[in-house]
Image (cartoon, helix red, strand yellow):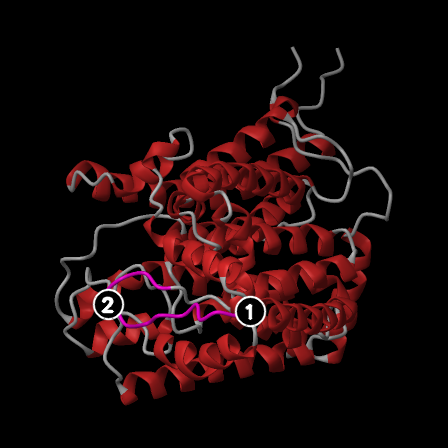
């Protein structure tokens, strides 16, 4: 009797993809589980749970952080070009966005007493839009509906990833930034470089440091960089017309220098925040701008400049690999976020998009690097988790308060790995890598075999 083969190329491929997913998924789930054990179980914290519950219960939303933006929008509605910046109370939330960002809140400010309800309700629609964009990033450019398990994964990620639900809970503009960056990611993944540049410019109009991503993209997505520059100029002109010259002068000469002082407050997951926590005795739970500290500010500037320059050199030297445009966007966005003086945890909400894309790559068999996938998954798990760290003391212990920054560094390093290899490879290895990329990349428009858990079940 002829025996049936116990394996086949298809089954082996599915098993390989499953092993890669487990290599990254299990450690990431362990990090997330440890976070819940430490924060919710051992410390009895409701901080993250309240953010998660705010998805279903708008009454749990915190509108205090949105009040300065609503006030700014209301001022410009009532008094065109009126002053909108007030940094006189450093222990409270202030309007720190560029003037044009107030326009986002203008439709709600015009609602009078119903402004807060209008804002909270609209942000749930934006949250849903981000979820749809995340599903599109996971599915990839194959124009199909997500499978049920992919939809479930997107839903869980949107609720469990703290930066995302924190953005919704606080009703801050970081939710719009996540939507714009996500739209840029989806567009770039589908080779729609001009729309990607426009969305990136919209994100940078709210968070100006994101314009620093543009030079880093110039070598792998030139049309995206050019579109971002043109859209940035148009948005700048619109901002001047909307808020007037005086507010822009105040923003550049007063708001930005004040914000550059940074915070030691533990949610600030930037290099500046880490240095403040290490070089000062400031309480980790104090939401207050630090006093001007030349040492910290210079060290932050030098460290950020060195990391940005190193990233630029890698992008330039790896410019031959246009197929690495998504890695270039992931690295550029993470680096510019980490080197900003203030990078609250919810500023990392868009980290879900490169993670979802990489999961899709593993599912389709295009990504076989278990180590890289594990590094990205664990890095994003650290970025998206919550640990109670406000009582830490001593330099070594206070270093742990920067767990989100370390997660961002880990994810950025993993995404940068193929760029670095290309940048410093020998000519022979470059030719071999190009040949392998051409062999493994699916043809445009061709059907791509996807991973479905049902395929892993043996025939009966």
- 291 or 285, nearer to the observer: 291
Q: Is disc 1 surrounded by few (<14), some (14 to 19) or many (20+) residues within 10 Å?
A: many
- 317 or 257, nearer to the observer: 257
Q: Is residue 310 left or right of residue 363?
A: left
Checking the image for residue 288, the label placed there is 2
Task: Residue at 50% x, 41% y: name it.
Answer: 123
Residue 295: which quarter of the image? bottom left
For the image, the number of numbered tags is: 2
Helix, strand, or loop for circle 1? Answer: helix
Residue at image mark 1: 243
Checking the image for residue 181, the label placed there is none
**Front label number (2 vs 1):** 1
- 434 or 132, nearer to the observer: 132
Helix, strand, or loop for circle 2? Answer: loop
- Tell me the chief SS of the magenta region: loop
Task: Residue at 28% x, 76% y: name it.
Answer: 275
Which residues make up the magenta segment?
81-94
Residue 257: which quarter of the image? bottom left
Whether residue 44 is visible to the viewer of this picture, yes or no, is yes
């Amino acid at each position: 009797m002829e025996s049936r083969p116990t394996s086949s190329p298809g089954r082996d491929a599915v098993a390989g993809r499953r092993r890669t997913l487990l290599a990254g998924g299990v450690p990431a789930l362990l990090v997330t589980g440890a976070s819940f054990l430490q924060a919710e179980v051992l410390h009895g914290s409701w901080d993250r749970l309240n953010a998660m519950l705010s998805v279903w219960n708008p009454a749990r939303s915190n509108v205090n952080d949105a009040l300065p933006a609503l006030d700014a929008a209301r001022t410009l509605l009532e008094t065109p070009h009126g002053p909108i910046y007030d940094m006189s109370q450093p222990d409270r939330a202030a309007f720190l966005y560029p003037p044009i960002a107030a326009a986002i809140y203008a439709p709600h400010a015009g609602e009078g007493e119903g402004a807060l309800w209008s804002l909270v309700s609209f942000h749930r629609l934006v949250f849903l839009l981000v979820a749809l964009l995340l599903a599109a990033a996971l599915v990839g450019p194959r124009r199909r509906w997500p499978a049920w398990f992919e939809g479930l994964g997107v839903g869980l990620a949107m609720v469990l990833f703290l930066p995302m639900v924190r953005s919704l809970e606080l009703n801050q503009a970081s939710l719009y930034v996540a939507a714009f960056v996500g739209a840029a990611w989806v567009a770039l993944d589908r080779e729609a470089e001009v729309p990607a540049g426009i969305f990136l410019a919209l994100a940078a109009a709210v968070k100006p440091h994101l314009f620093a991503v543009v030079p880093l993209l110039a070598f792998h997505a030139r049309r995206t960089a050019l579109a971002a520059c043109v859209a940035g100029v148009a948005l700048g002109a619109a901002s001047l017309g909307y808020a007037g010259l005086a507010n822009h002068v105040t923003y550049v000469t007063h708001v930005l220098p004040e914000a550059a002082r940074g915070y030691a407050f533990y949610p600030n997951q930037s290099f500046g925040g880490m240095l403040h926590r290490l070089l000062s005795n400031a309480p980790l739970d104090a939401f207050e701008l630090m006093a001007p500290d030349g040492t910290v500010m210079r060290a932050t500037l030098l460290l950020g400049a060195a990391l940005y320059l190193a990233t630029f050199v890698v992008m330039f030297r790896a410019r031959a690999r246009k197929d690495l445009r998504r890695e270039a966007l992931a690295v550029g966005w993470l680096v510019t976020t980490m080197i900003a003086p203030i990078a609250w945890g919810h500023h990392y909400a868009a980290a879900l998009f490169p993670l979802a894309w990489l999961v899709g790559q593993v599912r389709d068999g295009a990504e076989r690097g278990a180590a890289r996938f594990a590094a990205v998954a664990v890095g994003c798990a650290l970025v998206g988790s919550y640990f109670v760290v406000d009582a830490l003391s001593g330099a070594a212990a206070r270093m742990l308060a920067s767990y989100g920054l370390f997660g961002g560094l880990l994810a950025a390093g993993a995404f940068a790995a193929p760029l670095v290899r290309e940048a410093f490879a020998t000519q022979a290895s470059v030719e071999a890598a190009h040949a392998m990329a051409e062999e493994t990349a699916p043809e445009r428009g061709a059907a791509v075999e996807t991973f479905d858990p049902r395929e892993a079940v043996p025939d009966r």
